[in-house]
């Protein structure tokens, strides 16, 4: 009987410890800086227009709205090298990201740039967004 109670107490302790660790990790990930990986796939034949819009407008407007530009990449090999832009933004936290995106989307300068770049049709076929939290061993913080 005593052995069963001890096992039950131990299992309960381990479950509580695991729950607290998970909650602590989730809180740390949501309260610190967050990185956003975004992947834009251009409409066929419109990749240069996507790159031009980022080069001429978007990058600067991201900074204006509190988003830190970490880096922009194009794949080294086709077919993605001819269609896909990869980039990472840094935000203070998830709430800051949400607020920055809301302000960016309403910015009259962005609306004008977007309309001008899409005068002959949409230039982005697909957009993906993944939020990432740095690990404790990452050089990024």
Image: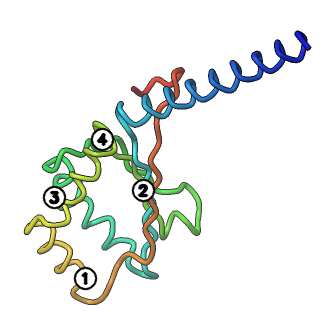
The picture places residue 94, in percent across and down from the top left corner, at 34, 44
- Describe residue 130's horizontal placement relative to residue 33 as left or right: right
The residue that appears at 71% across and 21% down in the rendered structure is 14
| In front: label 1 or label 4 | 4
Q: Which residue is mark 2?
A: 38
Q: Secondary structure at mark 4?
A: strand
The picture places residue 131, in percent across and down from the top left corner, at 44, 48
The Cα atoms of the two marked residues, 4 and 3, are separated by 14 Å
Residue contact between numbered discs 1 and 4, judged by CB atoms under 8 Å: no
- Describe residue 113's horizontal placement relative to residue 37 as left or right: left
Q: Secondary structure at mark 1?
A: loop
- Describe residue 2's horizontal placement relative to residue 28 as left or right: right
Q: Which residue is mark 4?
A: 91
Q: Residues within 10 Å of mark 1 (few under 14, many from 20)?
A: some
The Cα atoms of the two marked residues, 2 and 1, are separated by 20 Å
The residue that appears at 40% across and 41% down in the rendered structure is 35
């Amino acid at each position: 009987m005593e052995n069963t109670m001890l096992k039950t107490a131990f299992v309960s302790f381990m479950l509580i410890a695991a729950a607290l660790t998970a909650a602590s990790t989730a809180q740390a990930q949501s309260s610190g800086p967050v990185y956003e990986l975004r992947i834009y796939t251009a409409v066929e034949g419109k990749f240069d227009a996507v790159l031009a819009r980022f080069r001429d407008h978007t990058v600067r407007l991201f900074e204006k709205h509190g988003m830190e530009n970490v880096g922009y990449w194009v794949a080294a090999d086709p077919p993605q090298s001819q269609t896909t832009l990869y980039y990472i933004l840094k935000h203070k936290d998830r709430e800051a990201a949400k607020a920055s995106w809301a302000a960016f989307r309403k910015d009259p300068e962005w609306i004008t740039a977007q309309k001008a770049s899409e005068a002959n049709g949409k230039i982005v076929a697909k957009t993906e967004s993944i939020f990432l939290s740095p690990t404790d061993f990452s050089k990024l913080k």
